[in-house]
Image (spheres, helix red, strand yellow):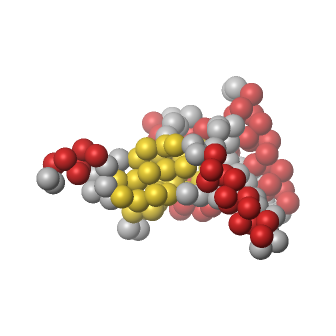
Amino acid sequence: MDARTQDALDRFERFLHEKDLRLTEARAAIVEAALSREGHYPIEDLIADLRRRGIRGSKATVYRTLPLLAEAGILQPAIVAGEAKSYETTYGRHHHDHLLCRKCGKIVEFEFEAFEMLQREVASRYGFRLEGHHHELVGVCPECLSRNG
């Protein structure tokens, strides 16, 4: 197990302990599977990864664990499309924001320091201590624009 995965498991175990919960074998497997993924992924892909690894856990366990992982800062909800949520693993990765094409679903990750500065200024203006944020800019990508004239 690599250091990043062990650090995330330790962090999640401490987080769970504070909530009087424990790090079960199934929860640990979900953390490991999430940390092995890149980019954005639907919950069903994570469940398929667990099954390929021979982990037998219920969908309900995965669905209950993902919000805990988000609250612990290990992953975050990504693009929300209808009822299906996507996630991305953020633990140990550099922060970025997203452009989402509403026609084809293409996701472009970007960094823009001006956004970071503005959100800190807005939080400060209203007396908030900023703990995180999630930006998704929705529009139409160049490929879809060119196909539709």
Residue 32 location, quadrant: top right
The vertical placement of 115 against 38, above or below, is: below
Q: Viewer-proximal residue, 63 or 3?
A: 3
Residue 15 location, quadrant: bottom right
Q: Is residue 31 visible?
A: no
Residue 12 x %, y %? 75, 49
The vertical placement of 4 against 122, above or below, is: above
Location of the N terminus (image quadrant):
top right
Q: Residue at x 24, y 44 (%)?
A: 143
Q: Viewer-proximal residue, 19 or 131?
A: 131
Residue 63 x %, y %? 55, 60
Q: Residue at x 45, y 36 (%)?
A: 52
Q: Residue at x 70, y 26 (%)?
A: 2
Residue 48 x %, y %? 43, 44
Q: Viewer-proximal residue, 132 or 26?
A: 132
Task: Work out which residue is located at the far top of the displayed protein and give it.
Answer: 2
Residue 48 located left or right of residue 7: left
Q: Viewer-proximal residue, 91 or 110?
A: 110
Task: Work out which residue is located at the far bottom of the displayed protein and give it.
Answer: 126
Residue 108 located left or right of residue 105: right
Residue 58 located left or right of residue 2: left
Residue 80 x %, y %? 45, 62
The vertical placement of 1 against 110, above or below, is: above
Q: Residue at x 49, y 50 (%)?
A: 98
Q: Is residue 19 visible?
A: yes
Residue 94 location, quadrant: top right
Q: How many marks?
A: 0
